[in-house]
Image: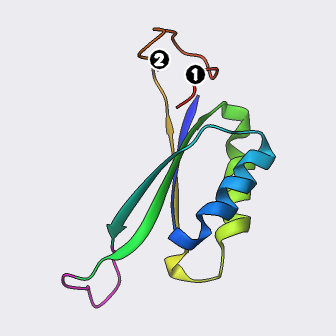
Amino acid sequence: MKRIEANIQTEKLRDVMKAIREVGVGGITVHECKGQGCQEPPLVGDFFSRTLVTTIVDDNQVDDIMNAITNTCCTNSKADGKIYVSDVVKMMDICTKEKETLDISI
């Protein structure tokens, strides 16, 4: 299993949610956040609003999800965002104590 985190422009959220669902993934978690890149010269005290979208998928779905996000969010601007993919070592539903299955909604 993989955890995909996409740091996107906030106004792209609805389109990303739709694109992810079209690929067959329904469970997502959304965080409103602020941050800044490593541009030169560095911004002092200025942060940009972003949305962090997180989902857990089977390994074979990663490329489809990444393509769906990039196709939706790309405006050819450095500020379009980033996608991070990491391994999910273990997962458990708190209520049912069900382990390591994608039937668990996040």
In the rendered structure, which amino acid carries the disc numbered 2? Asp
Marks 1 and 2, how far apart at CA: 6 Å
74 left or right of 94 in image: right
Asked whether the beta carbons under mark 1 and mark 2 sit within 8 Å of each other, the answer is yes
Locate residue 78, reporting x and y percent: 52, 80
Name the mark on residue 93.
2
Q: Work out whether residue 37 or residue 28 is closer to the camera in this orientation and state it.
A: 28
Locate residue 42, reporting x and y percent: 26, 85
Residue found 73% across the figure and 66% down from its top: 71
20 left or right of 37 in image: right
Locate residue 16, reporting x and y percent: 66, 59
Q: Secondary structure at mark 2?
A: loop
37 in magenta: yes
Classify residue 15 by image quadrant.
bottom right
Q: Work out whether residue 75 or residue 21 is closer to the camera in this orientation and state it.
A: 21
Q: Secondary structure at mark 1?
A: loop
Q: Note whether 68 is above or below 50 in the view shown.
A: above
Q: Note whether 2 is above or below 84 in the view shown.
A: above
User: Does any portion of residue 9 appear in the rendered image?
Assistant: no
Classify residue 55 by image quadrant.
top right
Q: Work out whether residue 8 or residue 15 is closer to the camera in this orientation and state it.
A: 15
Residue found 52% across the figure and 32% down from its top: 106
Name the mark on residue 6.
none
- The magenta stretch is 36-45
**Which quadrant of the figure contains the N terminus?**
top right
Residue found 70% across the figure and 39% down from its top: 25
Q: Point out the tag, 1 or 2, that comes first from the N-terminus.
A: 2
In the rendered structure, which amino acid carries the disc numbered 1? Ile
